[in-house]
Structure formats: structure tokens, C-alpha cells
Amino acid sequence: MLDREGFRPNVGIILLNARNQVFWGKRLRTHSWQFPQGGIKYGESPEQAMFRELHEEVGLRPDHVRILARTRDWLRYEVPDHFIRKDARGHYRGQKQIWFLLRLVGRDSDLDLRATDHPEFDAWRWNEYWVPLELVIEFKRDVYQMALSELARFLPRMNHHNRFLRSGVRLRRNDDDPQDDGQDAEPPESALGELSHSGDGDGGALQQAARQEPPPCGH
């Protein structure tokens, strides 16, 4: 299903854990990493397509996540001709996407890369929010940066004092002290060029897909 300009409607998913780290998946049989994404079928709303793709690609159900935000408009990227099937060249240009920011309310063990017979990923990890774009296939990088930048202000506020409050210690705060609530997050200068390893020990388990098939064209 293409629009008049040759773009296929699609959804992208940024899935957060409790530390505001994002699900980062390695595409099957490639060295590229990306967020879950997939096409919108005829008659589906973007939200319906998002929940379907969420289950097909990472095995999660609607009750495993909470929607925090979505992009206001479509974000588009063009696919180079050598990635397009010959019979689609000339009228297929690429994808237009609505991006969703989700919070995982389930457990890491709820994720399943083999939820279907056609897995998209063969490994995953938790990564810092500003993902290393050099690991993303080149023609998707601008859309990733736009989606991350637009949705960053909806990142949940991190409460770093919970461990003290649970132990019965009350903290004093100077009302004049500035607070960083994470609402206006901006990427650090080095964030787009370095792979973060801080999430390796926190549920970023590698999973192997049951079958290996080439990724669908233009996905």
C-alpha cells in the first residue's frame, strides 16, 4: 500500500526500560542495528500496526507496555534503488513512519525474538537513549535522529533517590537548586559516534533466532 508519492505507511517503535534505555536489535544476518518497525496494513490504524509489529518482532503484548508519545507527523526516508526489487522500481520510493515511544512495564524475560516464524532480529541489548547511528543502515539515520529528538522530551523523569527513601532516609533538597528532569534531553556530541556498553549487564541478553531469512525489501 503506497501513497501517491510512492511511500509505504510504516510505524517505528522506541521501547524504553525503567532506566530510559532503549531496545536495540541486531537485524537478522546483518551487522546493522535498529529499532523495531513495520508496515501498516490496509484498514489498520498506526497504533494497531504498532501493537502487531511489537508482538511479531519482539514478542510483547499491549499489556507489557505503556504508550508515552508518538510523533506528530510522518517522517520519511527514501530507499536506494539497489535495495528495491526490480518490479517495484519507479513507483516505490521508501517509507513514511509514525514513531511511538513506549515504556516496558513487563519484564525483560517477556521479550521473545522468536515469537513468529519470520524473526527480524537475532540479538538485542539495552542501549542508552541516544543510539549510535553509525550502526544504523545509512538511509535511515536522519529519520532516527528526527524521531529521537522529537520524542526525547517525553522521557519519564528518573527518580535517583528511591534507594534512600526505601531505607527510611529522608533527603533534604534546596528549593533553589536546579533540577534536571530529563524533559529537554539533547544528544551529547559523542553520542552518535560511540556505542554505549552501560546496558550490557541489565537484561540485554542475546537471543538467537530459530530461522534465518533475508530481511524483506524496504523494511
Image: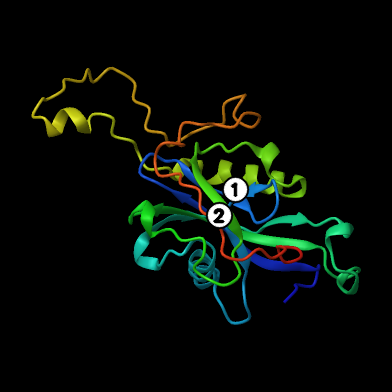
Mark 2 near mark 1, Cβ–Cβ under 8 Å? yes
Extreme left residue here? 168
Q: Nearer the viewer, residue 115 or 166?
A: 115
For disc 2, the marked residue is: 71
Drawn side of residue 185 relative to residue 161, left or right = right
Residue at left offset 27%, top offset 17%: 176
Residues packed near mark 1 inside 10 Å, few (<14), some (14 to 19) or many (20 plus): many
Task: Find the distance from the CA under tag 2 to the CA under tag 1.
Answer: 7 Å
Where is residue 20 drawn, in percent x and y?
Answer: 42, 41
Secondary structure under tag 2 reads loop
Give the side of residue 16 with respect to residue 31, left or right. Answer: left
For residue 147, the mark is 1
Which x, y percent locates residue 31? 69, 46
Q: Position of residue 203 (x, y in %)?
A: 40, 44
| Scheme of image coloration | rainbow
For label 1, the SS is: helix
- Please, what is the three-letter code of the amino acid marked with disc 2? Thr
- 216 above or below 109? below
| Lower sequence index among marks 2 and 1 | 2
Residue in the picture at 67% in, 68% down: 9
